Image (tube, grey):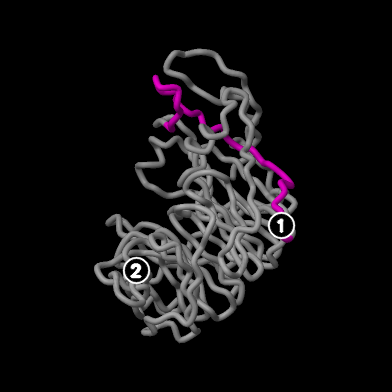
């Protein structure tokens, strides 16, 4: 990232319809130890069948959270770009899913979270073509969850309402929770902060050894790093890059506007680092291409380590530690999603 873009932002956090003044807060862009510009290599074999909302590498495969007519997850060969199969079939029968899913791996076990039934289904390593899970866990603690990550033998979830994080054990029962949100001078109601900045507008990921959790916001650019111990979550560090610049409505609620800054989305972690897509554009400009231009890399102490300027932009990504490679999704000249990669 050019040095001229490394700015100190002393900006008003909230812009209001009434033009009322608000307390200002300081947001600081990072200075990275290393700044790289990369041009991905693209795989032109098969194109994803629908919009991709998440991707993860597993052995020789790329798994996409992407709904086609029949399945909710697509499987591609990471080396050739060939479409392999669809998994998590649509439907209401045994082994089928009525709506969108989340997924993650526990070793070679594929775990698929059914967002309607609030159930995590476990599949053996031969999950392609295997519709019936060998284990099902009902997740308790809320009426719905936006995100779920594995934690020890259980889970950490982001509920649709109420507290911020819930810890569940291996049986799905709640054993802990975390309620705190970042403080803002102009907003003293945590429910407003939640609705404006965190409900469906932030992502979380967990350190592979399950000792840390990271959260980052889409509106504005705020990173939080937490320590995990048993049923406790504690905040280690908060990093503020850009203010969310929210718009105050007549009913005193807040929302994003075309002038709101877009921060982070799509987080992936390793034992050493946190990787995040960063935009830095206003929402108005972001909508034109829907891609970020950077991957920012932090260590687990919150120190900025490295930035990658992605020539051509980046929409989603995942990290292949075995090959030391980042696989990504961007858009081609026709506006279609295309698979690419570059080496770390």
In the drawing, does residue 170 fall left or right of residue 202?
right
Q: Is residue 42 magenta?
A: no
Sequence-first disc among 2 and 1: 2
Chain part drawn in magenta: 230-256
Secondary structure, mark 1, is strand
Which one is nearer the viewer's eye here, 169 or 104?
A: 169
Which residue is located at x 36 percent, y 57 percent?
Answer: 331
Which residue is located at x 52 percent, y 80 percent?
Answer: 59
- Residue farthest along the left direction in this orientation: 69
Whether residue 112 is visible, yes or no, is yes
Residue 217 location, quadrant: top right
Residue 297 lies, in percent from the top left, at 63, 54
Secondary structure, mark 2, is loop
Q: Is residue 232 magenta?
A: yes
> Which residue corresponds to mark 2?
97
Residue 328 lies, in percent from the top left, at 47, 63
Residue 279 lies, in percent from the top left, at 50, 44
Packing grade of label 2 (10 A; few <14, some 14-19, many >=20) is: many
In the drawing, does residue 74 fall left or right of residue 58?
left
* Viewport quadrant of the N terminus: top right
Which residue is located at x 57 percent, y 17 percent?
Answer: 22
Whether residue 311 is visible, yes or no, is no
Give above or below for 217 relative to 69.
above
Residue 290 lies, in percent from the top left, at 39, 47
> Which residue corresponds to mark 1?
228
């Amino acid at each position: 990232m050019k040095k001229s873009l490394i700015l100190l932002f002393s900006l008003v956090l909230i812009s209001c319809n009434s033009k009322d003044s608000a307390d200002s807060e300081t947001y600081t862009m990072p200075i990275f130890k290393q700044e790289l510009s990369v041009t991905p290599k693209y795989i032109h074999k098969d194109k994803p069948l629908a919009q991709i909302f998440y991707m993860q590498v597993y052995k020789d495969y790329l798994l996409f959270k992407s709904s086609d007519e029949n399945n909710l997850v697509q499987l591609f060969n990471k080396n050739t770009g060939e479409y392999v199969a669809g998994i998590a079939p649509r439907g209401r029968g045994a082994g089928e899913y009525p709506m969108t899913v989340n997924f993650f791996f526990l070793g070679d076990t594929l775990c698929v979270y059914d967002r309607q039934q609030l159930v995590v289904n476990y599949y053996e390593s031969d999950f392609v073509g295997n519709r019936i899970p060998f284990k099902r866990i009902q997740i308790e603690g809320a009426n719905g969850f936006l995100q779920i990550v594995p934690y020890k033998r259980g889970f950490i979830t982001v509920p649709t309402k109420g507290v911020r994080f819930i810890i569940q054990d291996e049986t799905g029962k709640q054993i802990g929770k975390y309620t705190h949100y970042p403080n803002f001078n102009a907003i003293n109601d945590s429910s407003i902060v939640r609705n404006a900045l965190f409900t469906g507008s932030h992502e979380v990921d967990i350190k592979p050894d399950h000792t840390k959790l990271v959260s980052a916001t889409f509106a504005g650019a705020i990173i939080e790093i937490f320590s995990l111990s048993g049923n406790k979550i504690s905040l280690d560090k908060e990093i503020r890059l850009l203010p969310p610049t929210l718009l105050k409505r007549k009913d005193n609620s807040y929302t994003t506007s075309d002038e709101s800054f877009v921060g982070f989305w799509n987080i992936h972690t390793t034992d050493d680092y946190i990787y995040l897509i960063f935009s830095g554009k206003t929402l108005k400009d972001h909508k034109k291409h829907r891609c970020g231009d950077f991957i920012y890399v932090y260590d687990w102490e919150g120190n900025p380590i490295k930035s990658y300027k992605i020539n051509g932009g980046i929409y989603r990504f995942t990290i292949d530690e075995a090959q030391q490679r980042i696989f990504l999704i961007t858009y081609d000249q026709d506006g279609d999603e295309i698979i690419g990669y570059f080496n770390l």
